[in-house]
Amino acid sequence: MMTDLILKHEERAVFALRSLYRSYGYAPYKMSRFEEYDLYVRNKDFLVSDQIITFSGDRGKLMALKPDVTLSIVKNAPEEPGVVQKVYYNENVYRDYREILQAGLECVGDLSDYEIAEVVLLAAKSLQLLGERYVLNISHMGLLSAVLESCGFNDRQRDQAMEALRRKNSQALQDLCGENWQAWEKLETIASCHGGKAELNRVAAVLTTGEEKQAFSQLEELWRVLEESGCGKNVCLDFSVGNNMGYYSGVVFRGYLPGIASSILSGGQYDKLPRKMGRKAKAIGFAIYLDLLQELYREENPFDVDTLILHDGTVDPLVLTRSAEEAAGKGTVLVAKQMPRDRRWKWLVRFEKGVRQP
């Protein structure tokens, strides 16, 4: 039972985000509530959750309540040289038997470095619309993959190293490296990264291979774009931000707002997903979990309504209207005959037998 105020709070966010994305030429994308189940089975590693709600559709085809929007966008994106599809969405998705309000955008096609930078910049600007004290943590899967390759790890060790990086577990990384001190120097530096431009310089000093330096140059370029746009002070280099290496190939990022425990924004470059679908396109995007704004709103304002006006049904409607109008001029108001169980209020006004009570 979400309050009207929370709904308005989320709706204001949706309108602001929509205006931002349109100003950069992104078109609205609308999809059905249902999608063929086979799409999600073939790409289940990309999904946040494997709990998918299914049912039998027309002609016995197995359908699913959509747990994700990105897969549908990539599947239906045009594929022509020089063409880039830029879309934004505001959709309900269904995960773990819950309905989740999600907004976001996707950029799919013949991408250049500009489109990559544009999407990361829009992620920062999206967070800025939701709260000035945001933090955008950035990592790069291409750089991490190149570093792990230079360490000489096998597949099992790479997975262990990625898990240790996510947890910032230096001891586990040291155990994996053994007497390979060059590998340890790289991984210890990367694992301890958490900060701004100075951290970029620290990472640059330990990179040795061409693949590492090529991926790092994209991070440097992103940083220049974000600083030039005034977002640099809110961006943090943090390699614990790591997603599925089977799909994500470039920059990855997560956004946070004070008062919300988990990330409210998550995204990255996922060129390997179109490849798995047999497409040549590149792709990058992000999602914003708008239902988490409830946590932020409740911290800012613990009340659902400012004034609750209770009456016993004997009050002149004109008197109640005047009282409600007066309260509405100072904030929000709810007029009711019974004490509501699901609302919290600051002030209570009672009318009994036609008279306002002291």
Image (tube, rainbow, N blue to C red):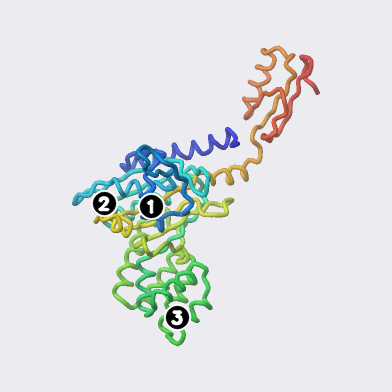
Q: Is residue 277 above or below residue 27?
A: below
Task: Check disc 2 and give the amino acid type.
Answer: Gly
Q: Earlier in the sequence, mark 1 or mark 2?
A: 2
Question: Residue 256: x, y in percent?
Answer: 51, 54
| Residue 73 in view | yes
Question: Residue 295: x, y in percent?
Answer: 59, 46
In the picture, which quadrant includes the C terminus? top right
Q: Nearer the viewer, mark 3 or mark 1?
A: 3
Between 148 and 70, the one lying in front of the other is 70
Q: Nearer the viewer, mark 2 or mark 3?
A: 2
Mark 1 packing: few (<14 Cα in 10 Å), some, or many (20+)? some
Using the rendered view, name the quadrant where residue 45 is placed: bottom left
Question: Residue 181: x, y in percent?
Answer: 43, 85
Of all residues, the one furthest to the front in this rendering is 60
Task: Check disc 3 and give the amino acid type.
Answer: Trp
- The disc at residue 184 is 3
- Is 163 situated left or right of 208 in this image? right
- Is 340 situated left or right of 151 in this image? right
Q: Earlier in the sequence, mark 2 or mark 3?
A: 2
Of all residues, the one furthest to the right in this rendering is 358
Q: Residue at x 69, y 28 (%)?
A: 308
Q: Earlier in the sequence, mark 3 or mark 1?
A: 1
- The disc at residue 121 is 1
Q: Disc 2 to disc 3, how far (Cα)?
A: 38 Å
| Numbered disc 2: secondary structure | strand
Q: Residue at x 50, y 44 (%)?
A: 100
